[in-house]
Amino acid sequence: MLLETGLMAKFLIIDDHPLFREALHGAVELAYPDSDTQDAASLSEACDILQTDTGFDLALLDLSIPGVKGMEGLLHLRTHFPRLPVVVVSGNEDPRIVSQVIAYGAAGFIPKSSKKSALAEAIQRVMNGAVYIPEQFADNDGPDALDDRTQEMIKRLSSLTPQQMKVLKMLCNGLLNKQIAYELQVGETTVKAHVSEILRKLNVFSRTQAVIEVTKLETLGAIEPVTMPPEHSGPH
């Protein structure tokens, strides 16, 4: 049973599918009949809204929105709007994804397959201060469960700024500092500062060790792949 709160809550739904946005609206209204709910069909649209209105109580984020890969949307919101709780609402119900979004600081994970009443209850539980995970994922101690060291490294990765993540991806793709500087249109001194901060945040002692740690997480399926075929055109 849903609690009577009398709270005038404010929600931001970030999803590019109109039908599912409508379903989320219904779930929000079931949990908070007098709530104020706004929509965004992309991450950039959501950020524009959040930059002009800081009064949101909760964001409901689909991982698969245009222009965003993997956890980039969640990382961006957690980095730029750290006081805004974010619940991931996704059609990808891989237990590793659930573990990863929580490690990255999400306030909960709700499968898109959930019924409206379950969506509403999950939203309300998060609003009441809980971190929501569906029961089928709560006791994930099987082979897909992430160990403590892996969880810790994911948390460290989540502390990187978007620019530092870009630098780390380029490191993983074998780019040198001067190539990274060319790609990002910054000076090599700036790149060196980013690399130093990445090593500090990841608690590693070399760029090679950083790449090894990221590769391990990719192999475990704990994070989306960050390595890709080189397409840079910078100096060699």
Image (cartoon, rainbow, N blue to C red):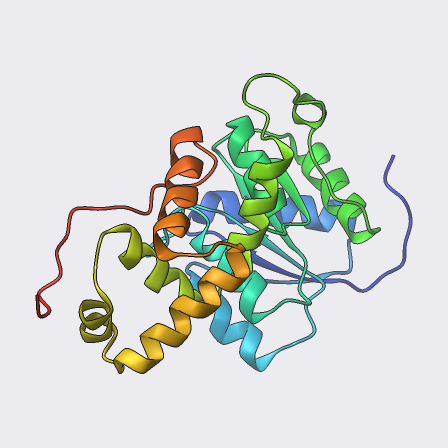
Q: Is residue 226 left or right of residue 230?
A: right
- State which quarter of the image contains the C terminus: bottom left
Instruction: Say if 63 sits above or below 190 in the image.
Output: above
Residue 44 seen anywhere in this rendered image of the structure = no
Image quadrant where residue 111 sits: top right
184 horizontally vs 234: left or right = right
Residue at (90% x, 44% y) in the render: 3
User: Residue 63's x, y, as percent?
Assistant: 46, 46
* Residue 134 visible within the image: yes
* Rendered residue at 41%/44% (across/down): 214
* Residue at horizontal 67 percent and vertical 21 percent from the top: 136
Pick the front one: 153 or 206? 206
Query: Residue 82 in the image: x percent, y percent?
Result: 64, 67
Q: Is residue 192 above or below residue 131?
A: below
Extreme residue toward the top, this view: 142
| Quadrant of res 217 | top left
Q: Is residue 42 left or right of residue 104?
A: left
Q: Residue at x 46, y 61 (%)?
A: 199
Q: Is residue 188 above or below residue 195?
A: below
Task: Give residue 93's position: percent from left, percent from top.
Answer: 52, 29
Indicate the quadrant containing the N terminus: top left, top right, bottom left or bottom right. top right
